[in-house]
Amino acid sequence: MAKDGQHPLDSDRGTTIVEQPVITSIVSVVTRETEKIQPSSGGTRVPGDNSPTVGEFLSSLSSSGDFTRGVSVEVEDREATVDLTLTVPYGESIPQVTQAVRDAVVQRVNDLTGMDVTEVNITVADVATSEE
């Protein structure tokens, strides 16, 4: 158990290290749970073209599938920086949606790992219509 003033990942019996893939997975889950947001690999479609963008195609070939698509995390000591690329549903307020995602990421990562999230940078790459 951590003593007062001691970081939650440190104890009298050792130290816990949380690696980048753990934070990436948490952020991916939180992103999907918040406002039905879709992660995005970026890229631009021609109107009416439903074929995948290059980023979507390449992520489909990766062994991890698209679970962590659009999520980049850097971990240093007890802090994490998160970069997200998202697709927001058409008609939703981008500032409200991105703030909800940002708040949820910071809270959940801190609750589950004890780590501080110093930044959550969000790029909105597309808006999803009901046709997509």
Image (cartoon, grey):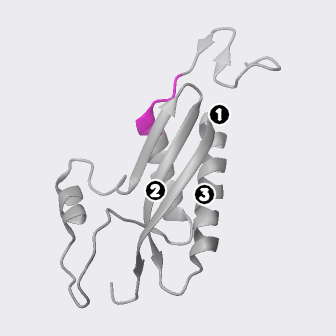
Task: Calculate the distance from the C-alpha at mark 2 to the C-alpha at mark 1.
Answer: 21 Å
Residue range corresponding to the magenta coloring: 17-22
Left or right: 44, with 71 as reference point: left
- Number of labels in the image equals 3
Q: Quadrant of the N terminus?
A: top right
Among numbered discs 2 and 1, the one appearing first in the sequence: 2
Q: Quadrant of the C terminus?
A: bottom left
Among numbered discs 3 and 2, the one appearing first in the sequence: 2
Task: Calculate the distance from the C-alpha at mark 1 to the C-alpha at mark 3.
Answer: 17 Å
Left or right: 64, with 111 as reference point: left
Element on which disc 1 rests = loop
Q: Do the numbered discs 3 and 2 sit on residues whose CB atoms are within 8 Å?
A: no
Q: Which residue is mark 2?
A: 84
Q: Residues within 10 Å of mark 2 (few under 14, many from 20)?
A: many
Name which residue type carries label 1.
Gly
The residue depicted at 69 percent of the width and 9 percent of the height is: 12
Among numbered discs 1 and 3, the one appearing first in the sequence: 3
